[in-house]
Image (spheres, rainbow, N blue to C red):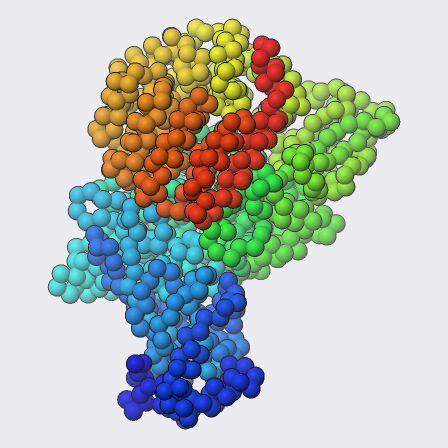
């Protein structure tokens, strides 16, 4: 029986209505006569009225929207959580203060996996206990009311929840165990705050949150704001934090445990890094400098100051996440920390990661997407500016910022979701993967080249100024550009459809013609493409900018009989592939920048895979480059990666000995290994020779080098370990496994990234058994299942293991990560691989989101098999 606390005489639903009637005007749920009669019956029908009214209150609208109506927003929310690390449950109470912009006849909030114990509505100084009801398919709990709420109301809810196990990075979860109590942390992006407390868990709502934690005495607590009061209560303590600024639930955070604190000097704002005491890693010395550089660059570029009074970091093993942009408490995964022997590439990626998370201060916190269908406004914009920060402060080590589209092209086929699409739940959003970071950022790079640096800077400043503290949509951004630039058309073409175009330069009646078609020729799509061309007439370089939106167009401003060399997409900023079939002279190498040359290598690789270029001639070009360019040049690094990837994703098993023999015949097999290992590309050279060319000298060197010092002190440690694993006997492989628990965390990560490069079928089982063992409980293991499948001969073995151990895998890995498991076989490139993929996951289709990923990978394999037919013929003829 539900009670009203306002007046003890008001008891039961019928009398409750009478008490409310004294103070407010009743309205029916709508104007229909039958619902008016329900309210009338409530006063007259005794038990019948109770039943009818309970139905009325508890009814969850069958055709519920996937969002709570904009009329309901939460201006303030107080949250009290009682948490004991090590226990599987927690409890709490929260008060939501609603701001109601127009009369509504219901009140709603999100809840997922919580046990609601009591829900109390306060409206016009009256308190009513509402029935506890279940959430709908979108996690919305909707209490329909027989009257309308206006202006404001409050809900107070008592509840209990579950602490997620280690590795399940959702809601409140265990980060790590060791000596002492486990560390707890939160992950609320996206749609996960509702696992920890009832809330209007929507990025379109910004709220002031006030958190109070009841935790064991002796433990520490972290939050987006500082504690303002701590009360000791016997064996427990009550910690009250200062209210947050108005933020959305995605970027709230809390941590409970025992932490070491490191002041981040030189950050420009008060900043501290917190790390669980049982995590034995060092905070990078340059972290404070990186924070300062990121804030300085973005503040100046956007003409918008950093809006918060501090910027702390929580550094711990946080599962599959690299980082998370919680307001004033950025989370950073320990596996992203560069070691003392970090390569140039590792340093570049770390710097970009820090800049990315700091950039969210403006793109995500200050200006927030209105809904997840505009998620790119948060992630793509932050990634775009992160690359700018790195390029500005580290121009000699910014290669990791080049051509982000290349990694996007792998998964962006016509089965992939578009960046802008209907998003109703977390599964819809999780399905996009890394395309926000790669495709979205590439789109911004392309726009910058199209509109010019000055125009983009001006628009970005206007965008941040107009929407700071609030929300924005894609239309808000594109609407700021002059219409003549056609930015809205360009953005719409790339955001609302998947895939990408192939731009062809050809001649028609001696005139240069540009045309477009889908790179995946089985799809009929068209884009609005901003193009930048460099033309060389033998004397000077000139730049031409234009927009290709039709199927084809004549190249303007070029003489009909011109023999200009044309370079399409210099610097590789375009989200398209391109081919020159004009017959004009090739653009001179010496007139190309480093970015031009690397972009051209990527484009040539893609065209060769498609069978549009001769594969043997292409490989010979890479060999010539490796023989003539410095061993540690960026071109050499790229060429080495292309050749290694060929063994993984293009060359079938029966042709691999022939391909390896061709390379060994044309590459110098005697290498100065000791000297090479001191260079940035040393690991790549060692992997190519030791793993794929089976060079006895490279293998001997790797073994001797690994035996000469502790593994923690090896340069290019992961590469050395991969060569050892790939050439190990079963006893030697077992020896590598036994080393795991004796190593530091960074070396353990490298070993896990190396052990999957196995030598035989038995080692596949040994590796997978080890991944599923307790030894790796605090490590991310899902993506590491792909390593044995990199070898075409062992893919069936890997697939069989997954089929036979499905239950163990699903018990260890949450569904939001399991849905990506088909990607472990994305390097397949044969009809047999496609059939193997479908058989392997036939019993996994109940996992939310997996079937869509399966379709994407299957299409990728099918296209690879079709497109590399000519390459296979060329290899067979080598």
Compared across the picture, whether 257 is left or right of 557 comes to left
Which x, y percent locates residue 501?
67, 36
Q: Inspect this view and state whether residue 353 appears.
A: no
Asked which quadrant contains residue 465, the reply is bottom right
Q: How many marks?
A: 0
Q: Which residue is pictured at 55% across the width and 13% down the height?
A: 623
- On the image, which quarter does residue 592 sit in? top right
Which of these two is toward me, 268 or 285? 285
Q: Residue at x 52, y 15 (%)?
A: 655
Does any portion of residue 623 appear in the rendered image?
A: yes
Q: Is residue 20 above or below residue 830?
A: below
Q: Looking at the picture, does residue 164 appear above or below residue 525?
A: below
**Along the line of sight, the residue nearer the viewer: 256 or 373:** 373
For residue 647, side relative to residue 527 (left or right)? left
- Where's the N terminus, which quadrant? bottom left
Q: Residue at x 35, y 72 (%)?
A: 132
Residue 589: image location, x then y, percent: 65, 19
């Amino acid at each position: 029986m539900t009670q009203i606390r306002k007046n003890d005489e008001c008891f039961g639903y019928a009398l409750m209505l009478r008490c409310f009637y004294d103070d407010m005007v009743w309205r029916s749920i709508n104007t229909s006569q039958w619902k008016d009669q329900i309210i009338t019956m409530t006063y007259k029908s005794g038990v019948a009225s109770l039943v009818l009214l309970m139905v009325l209150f508890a009814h969850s609208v069958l055709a519920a929207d996937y969002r709570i109506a904009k009329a309901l927003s939460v201006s303030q929310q107080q949250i009290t959580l009682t948490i004991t690390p090590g226990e599987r449950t927690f409890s709490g109470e929260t008060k939501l203060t609603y701001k109601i912009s127009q009369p509504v006849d219901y009140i709603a909030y999100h809840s997922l996996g919580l046990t609601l114990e009591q829900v109390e509505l306060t409206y016009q100084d009256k308190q009513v206990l509402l029935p506890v009801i279940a959430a709908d398919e979108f996690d919305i709990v909707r209490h329909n009311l027989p009257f309308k709420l206006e202006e404001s109301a409050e809900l107070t809810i008592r509840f209990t929840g579950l602490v997620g196990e280690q590795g399940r990075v959702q809601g409140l979860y265990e980060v790590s165990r060791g000596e002492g109590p486990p560390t707890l942390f939160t992950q609320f992006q996206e749609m996960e705050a509702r696992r920890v407390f009832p809330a209007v868990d929507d990025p379109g709502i910004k709220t002031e949150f006030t958190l109070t934690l009841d935790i064991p005495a002796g433990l520490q607590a972290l939050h987006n704001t500082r504690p303002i009061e701590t009360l000791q209560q016997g064996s427990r303590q009550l910690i009250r934090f200062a209210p947050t600024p108005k933020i959305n639930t995605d970027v709230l955070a809390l941590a409970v445990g025992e932490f070491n604190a490191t002041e981040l000097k030189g950050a420009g704002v008060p900043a501290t890094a917190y790390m669980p005491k049982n995590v034995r890693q060092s905070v990078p010395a340059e972290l404070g400098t990186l924070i300062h550089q990121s804030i300085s660059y973005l503040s100046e570029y956007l003409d918008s100051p950093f809006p918060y009074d501090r910027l702390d970091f929580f550094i711990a093993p946080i599962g599959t996440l690299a980082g998370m942009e919680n307001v004033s408490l950025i989370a950073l995964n320990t596996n992203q920390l560069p070691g003392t022997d970090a390569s140039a590439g590792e340093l570049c990626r770390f710097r970009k990661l820090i800049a990315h998370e700091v950039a969210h201060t403006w793109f995500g916190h200050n200006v927030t997407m209105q809904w997840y269908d505009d998620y790119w406004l948060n992630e793509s914009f932050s990634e775009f500016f992160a690359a700018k920060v790195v390029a500005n402060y580290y121009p000699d080590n910014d290669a990791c910022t080049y051509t982000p589209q290349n990694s996007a092209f792998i998964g962006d086929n016509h089965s992939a979701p578009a960046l802008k699409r209907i998003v109703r739940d977390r599964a819809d959003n999780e399905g996009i993967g890394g395309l926000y970071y790669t495709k979205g950022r590439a789109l911004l790079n392309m726009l910058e080249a199209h509109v010019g640096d000055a125009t983009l800077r001006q628009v970005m400043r206007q965008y941040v100024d107009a929407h700071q503290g609030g929300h924005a949509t894609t239309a808000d951004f594109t609407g700021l550009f002059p219409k003549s630039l056609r930015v809205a058309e360009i953005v719409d073409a790339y955001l609302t459809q998947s895939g990408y175009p192939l731009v062809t330069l050809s001649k028609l009646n001696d005139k240069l013609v540009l045309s477009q078609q889908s790179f995946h020729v089985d799809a009929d799509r068209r884009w609005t493409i901003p193009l930048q061309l460099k033309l060389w007439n033998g004397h000077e370089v000139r730049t031409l900018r234009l927009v290709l939106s039709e199927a084809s167009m004549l190249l303007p401003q070029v003489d009909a009989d011109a023999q200009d060399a044309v370079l399409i997409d210099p610097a590789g900023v375009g989200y398209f592939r391109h081919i020159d079939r004009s017959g004009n002279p090739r653009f001179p190498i010496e007139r190309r920048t480093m970015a031009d040359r690397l972009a051209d290598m990527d484009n040539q690789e893609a065209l060769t895979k498609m069978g549009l270029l001769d594969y043997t001639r292409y490989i010979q070009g890479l060999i010539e480059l490796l023989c003539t360019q410095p061993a540690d040049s960026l071109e050499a690094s790229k060429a080495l990666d292309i050749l290694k990837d060929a063994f993984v994703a293009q060359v079938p098993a029966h042709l691999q000995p022939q391909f390896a023999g061709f390379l060994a015949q044309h590459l110098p097999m005697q290498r100065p290994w000791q000297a090479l290992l001191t260079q940035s590309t040393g690991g790549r050279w060692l992997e190519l020779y030791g793993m794929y060319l089976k060079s006895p000298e490279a293998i001997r060197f790797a073994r001797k080098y690994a035996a000469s010092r502790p593994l923690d002190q090896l340069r290019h440690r992961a590469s050395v370990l991969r060569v050892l694993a790939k050439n190990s006997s079963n006893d030697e492989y077992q020896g590598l496994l036994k080393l795991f628990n004796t190593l530091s965390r960074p070396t353990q990560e490298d070993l896990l990234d190396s052990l999957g490069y196995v030598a035989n079928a038995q080692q596949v089982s040994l590796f997978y058994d080890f991944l599923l063992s307790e030894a790796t409980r605090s490590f991310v293991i899902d993506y590491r299942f792909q390593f044995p499948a990199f070898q075409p001969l062992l893919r069936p073995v890997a697939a069989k293991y997954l089929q036979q151990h499905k239950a163990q895998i699903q018990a260890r890995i949450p569904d939001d990560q399991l849905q990506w498991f088909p990607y472990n076989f994305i390097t397949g490139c044969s009809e047999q691989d496609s059939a193997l993929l479908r058989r392997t996951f036939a019993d996994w289709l109940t996992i939310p989101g997996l079937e869509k990923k399966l379709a994407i990978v299957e299409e990728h394999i099918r296209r690879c098999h079709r497109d590399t037919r000519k390459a296979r013929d060329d290899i067979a003829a080598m």
